[in-house]
Image (spheres, rainbow, N blue to C red):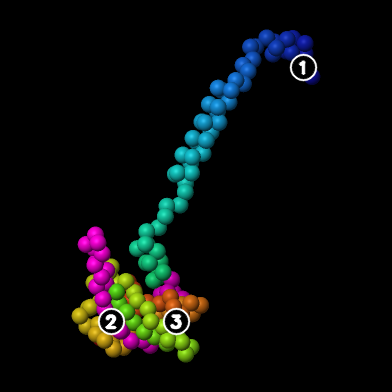
Amino acid sequence: MLSEDTVAALGSFPRQAMTPFRIYTLVLAGSGTLFTAYLFLRRKPKSAAELERERREWLERVGRITDGTVIDVQEISANDHKSSTLLIFQYDVAGVSYEASQDVTYLRHFINLHSCRLGLPTSVRYDPQNPGNSMVVSEKWMGLRQ
């Protein structure tokens, strides 16, 4: 228990009332601190190139391989003068025929695009759960037959 002297001493300090200005200041400071923490700790969105690289790596690990055929190689120019190179191929899985394309713009140094001709046999690596998710070329795997 507190003695009478302690209670009297505590009562003698001037108490500051919580004014609306002081409450708003504390709320604003807390909100600013939380927002700053969110900006520093949130996940940064991945670029399209990073997502594509992760997809290829995943297919390298879990993908199954089947035979396919290169149909075409197309170079597409965008408005900002950046061109994309698409490798278009066809393959069959469980009696279903798939036609897909892969952007090989950043993988050009792994393949010779001039040797990719119509009807070139190739190996296609695909996702067994989603056979439409496939690839012919990656950083560590090459399905094109020369």
Magenta residues, dominant SS class = strand
- Quadrant (top left, top right, bottom left, bottom right) of the C terminus: bottom left
Q: Which mark's residue is nearer the viewer, 2 or 3?
A: 2
Reading the image, the residue beneath label 3 is: 64
Does label 1 or label 3 sit earlier along the sequence? 1
Which residue is under mark 1? 2
Residue 90 in sight in this render: yes
- Image-based side of 91 in relation to 87, left or right: right
- Can you name the residue that lies furthest to the left here? 114
> Does 44 appear in magenta?
no
Q: Amino acid at mark 3?
A: Arg
Camera sees residue 143: no
The residue labelled by disc 2 is 72
Tell me the kind of residue under disc 1.
Answer: Leu
Residue 74, above or below 40: below
**Residue depicted at x 47% and y 46%:** 41
Helix, strand or loop status at disc 1: loop
Q: CA distance from mark 2 to mark 3?
A: 23 Å
Q: Position of residue 2 (x, y in %)?
A: 77, 17
**CB atoms at circles 2 and 3 under 8 Å apart?**
no
